[in-house]
Image (cartoon, grey):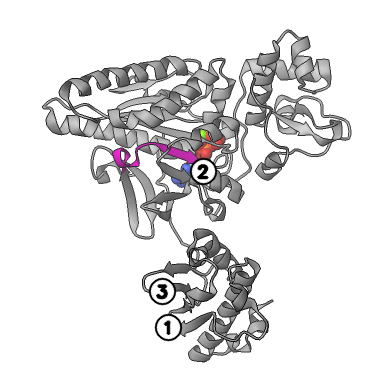
Amino acid sequence: MTDTMVSPQLHTSDPSAQRQGLAQFISERTLRLLTKNGALTNDATARGFNQPIFYAWQRDDRLVLVFNPLLLKDPDTVLSPRFRHHLSTVLGGRAVVPTNTRGVFLQIGYWPAPPIDLQARPLNLSAQPDPFCVPIGITVRGPLWLSILKMDSVLVGGSRRMGKTRLLHGWIQSLLHGGQTLLYLWDGKPNCAEFRGYSGRPQTTVIGERDLMAGLTQVTSLMRDRSTLLAAAGVADFHSYNAKSAVKLQPIVLVIDEVTAISLLPDADQILRTIEDLISRGGAFGIYPVLATQRPSATAVRGISKTNLSTRISLPVPSHTDSQIILERVGADKLPKVPGRLAIVWDARLIEAQAFTVDLPQAMEPLPASVAAEPIAGPAVQPAVSDEVRDLAVRCSMDNGGKFTEAWLVSIGQGQKEARRLQAAWADQGWIFQNPRLKRAWCLSPSLRQQLDLAPFAGEPDEPDGRDELDEVGEPPLQA
Ligand SMILES: Nc1ncnc2c1ncn2[C@@H]1O[C@H](COP(=O)(O)OP(=O)(O)OP(=O)(O)O)[C@@H](O)[C@H]1O
Ligand SMILES: [Mg+2]
């Protein structure tokens, strides 16, 4: 149904007639959604029943729907974020704000909210409100900085090349500027491609690609030392210790970019367990993990995101499922697909921001020309794969026609457990997919084959590269 069909007054220039038409349009769609969702009592839907389910109160800038709670099966359904989101969607993006003091109300804007125009601005470190604040970006209310101590543990998610690592660069540079935080940084890239520019900076440890477990062991032993110290001082946590003691403990921020790459490490299980432990117990000892990931649906990330990560930030993602996993609510799927645009859940509100633009540390070598020349909003660039991955993929293509099956992995000398671990890890990275043309056997993904210049399968369907399609091919095999 179009607006015009609902009400011809919508196209009039008389404002009050226009509001009347919009009120009718909004009321009809709300009623239809309530009926479709089974939110009304049997009385309300009975033929011949003619009591109003809600009154539509026209204000200057919005319509207020005042519900009769006795005709709602459960008033909380109408007030729930899910119902509001659906209603906003069927109303073309109009803001829907609930109130449940002295009644059940929904306030609905007459016109859809205009897209927020947030211009990226360069990061200005001298604007840092305190040494522990990190920049989130520009919001409609101005620049937003948040204390890492309040954010506690953080998950940053979002599609490829949308600006996760840049955001982390901004945080690292701000904490370095503040000068009162110990930093442990792991970027999951060969040769620490992202964070190596910070090595040698005060209080900073850049952890090598293969040394994550060693880095985490260091952080865990600091946690243990602090636990002894706190017990001796008779205090329960880091903040109470610092309030009492003349010598202050510094917060430790552990930044782990590319969480899915962990599954490629031989000690992945142990690493993931240690990270989960640091997330759940670290806060009391002043340890603040910050994790970033491209593929929120990867098994490693799902496990971690189920744990107690307090703050969620998402750059644009393609589907509401991704948004749900990262933010535990929809919203990030609606962000404009602009690098640096993000949504953060803070104080129970979803805030949209445009991250500041950040220069990379000076010691960093420039990116290879092919990557540097990539347009900002252009197609995604595949991160480089390691030699090991390349060798195994080439061998799989030549020996087994690109079928990355458990049987083939076992036949080349991998144990069964290792074969399953490899399959799970490769599926997480999107290097293999379940090929519908080959009885859903795990096969090298077209993107990996293209990247490594390997032969395509004959008559094969196109790349299951979009995230939605990856969801469709199902979970990677369980690790034994
Ligand atoms: N806040 C921003 N403002 C403007 N451009 C940005 C911003 N953040 C990132 N970009 C651009 O997007 C590119 C990719 O950013 P970044 O490497 O941080 O993405 P990513 O999400 O970490 O990617 P990947 O998933 O591949 O790791 C940058 O090289 C930069 O050109
Ligand atoms: Mg990155």
Label 1 or label 3, whichever lies nearer to me, is 3
Which stretch did the figure color magenta?
A: 147-157
Q: Is residue 123 above or below residue 303?
A: below
| Residue identifier under label 2 | 326
- Report which quarter residue 467 is drawn in: top right
| Residue identifier under label 3 | 103
Residue 419 at x, y percent in the picture:
69, 16
**Residue at coordinates 73% horizontally, 7% vertically from top-left?**
413
In primary-sequence order, the first of circles 1 and 3 is: 1
Cα–Cα gap, marks 1 and 3? 18 Å
- At label 1, the amino acid type is Arg
| Foreground residue among 235 and 293 | 235
Query: From the viewer's perspective, is 314 left or right of 200?
Result: right
Q: How many other residues sit within 10 Å of disc 2, few (<14), some (14-19) or many (≥20)?
A: many
- At label 3, the amino acid type is Gly
Q: Which mark is residue 59?
A: 1
